[in-house]
Image (cartoon, rainbow, N blue to C red):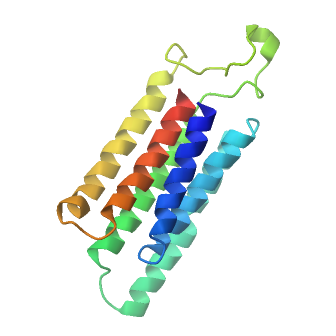
Amino acid sequence: MTVVAFVLAVCGMGAALARHRRAPLHALTAVGMGAVMVAVLAAPAFSRLAASTITIALLLPLGAAALALRARSGRHPSLGLRTAVAVSIVDIGFMATAVLVMPLHLAVGPVSAIGLTGTMIGHGAAAPGWWVVWLVLLTWAGCAAALLHPAVRGRAPGWLLDVVCSGSMIAAMAAMAA
């Protein structure tokens, strides 16, 4: 599942980068979130609190860039830009929460206490608290769908890439929780 999560995170970053000229704020946050996911996947001992904090820190450049764009243009941003910023904020918030509630990897916990090798501590449907992770992921998917629905319905340019990006990030977190 680690490989699947890695591929999905890279796919989400690629979808955001494909739209980097039209939605640079979304690309910035998606690449940042993907980098945090890859770091957590590559280094099982990577602190969940640090990953969550780094993810939340992505709100700072996103907010600054959104305010700069608004000040420069002097008017309300377009529907596509508002959607991209809203989806980015939702993705950042839910990913930070999901990273905090994710179970620990084997490298973090004592192997001898469980007697299992080659598995992850706390992973799988039988793990205590598994429903919290899935509740966060399903709520995240619902919020992203609600925000993307107007763009999909209105056939706004790039809506498919936004759906692929957000969907891939949510699916990567689901794979990490499996």
The residue that appears at 48% across and 47% down in the rendered structure is 169
Toward the left, the furthest residue is: 153
Image height check: is 74 above or below 103? Answer: below
Toward the top, the furthest residue is: 115
Image height check: is 72 above or below 93? Answer: below
Q: Which of 20 and 113 lies nearest the eye of the viewer? A: 20
Q: Where is residue 97 in the image (x, y as percent from the top left)?
A: 52, 43
Q: Position of residue 82 (x, y in %)?
A: 33, 71
Q: Which of 158 and 102 lies nearest the eye of the viewer? A: 158
Image side of residue 123 versus residue 25, left or right = right
**Any part of residue 26 in sight:** no
The residue that appears at 49% across and 17% down in the rendered structure is 125
The residue that appears at 49% across and 23% down in the rendered structure is 130
Residue 47 occupies quadrant: top right
Residue 159 occupies quadrant: bottom left
**Any part of residue 133 in sight:** yes
Q: Quadrant of the N terminus?
A: top right
Q: Position of residue 148 (x, y in %)?
A: 29, 57
Image height check: is 127 above or below 71? Answer: above
Image side of residue 4 versus residue 72, left or right = right
Image side of residue 29 versus residue 85, left or right = right
Q: Where is residue 78 in the image (x, y as percent from the top left)?
A: 29, 78
Image side of residue 74 versus residue 62, left or right = left
The residue that appears at 51% across and 22% down in the rendered structure is 129
